[in-house]
Amino acid sequence: MELIHDTKTGKLTLYVLDGKARNSVMIKDAPKIELKTEAGAKQIAVKATDAKDGKASQFEASDDALRTPTLKGKISLVYSCKRSNNHRGQKDITRTTGACQ
């Protein structure tokens, strides 16, 4: 997963990529973002921006809580019922997967 974080607008763009970060991977369910804020945990709404046939590989989230340069929390996603822990250290967000169903 690649993340683009725009602190001025409070927008986070997420690109779901394959293991070599070369090709997009279409997934059915939008990733879930949970930030750790001073006020406690906060769920951030995520929407698909390139949906096709009920799947997408690009998503966006906008929220005032995303205006800070350092984010703490997690992004969860499931694709093909395979788990992915892709840690690149970007923006101090730990990316983990949700449970396969």
Image (cartoon, rainbow, N blue to C red):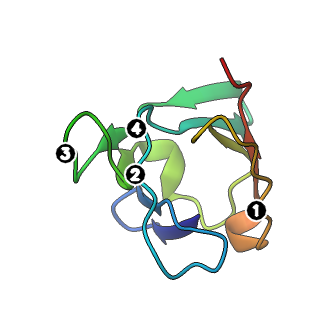
C-alpha gap between disc 1 and disc 4 = 19 Å
Upstream in the sequence, badge 2 or badge 3?
A: 2
* Residue at which label 3 appears: 52
Mark 1 or 2 closer to N-term?
2
Say which amino acid is labelled 2. Answer: Met
Contact (Cβ within 8 Å) of mark 2 with mark 3: yes
Q: Nearer the viewer, mark 1 or mark 4?
A: 1
Q: Residue at x 56, y 27 (%)?
A: 43
The residue that appears at 74% across and 35% down in the rendered structure is: 38
Displayed quadrant of residue 30: top left
**Residue 37, above or below 11:** above
Q: Are marks 4 and 3 in contact (CB under 8 Å)?
A: no
> Dot 2 lies on which element?
loop
What is the C-alpha distance between the residues marked 1 and 2?
16 Å
Q: How much space separates mark 4 and mark 3, taking CA atoms?
A: 16 Å
**Mark-to-mark CA distance, 4 and 2:** 15 Å
Inspect the image, locate mark 1, and give the three-letter code of the amino acid beneath it. Answer: Asn
Numbered disc 1: secondary structure: loop
Residue that carries the numbered disc 2 in the rendered image: 26
Q: Mark 4 or mark 2: which comes first in sequence?
A: 2
Q: Which residue, given by chain and number where applicable, does mark 1 sit on?
A: 86
Of 76 and 26, the residue lying toward us = 26
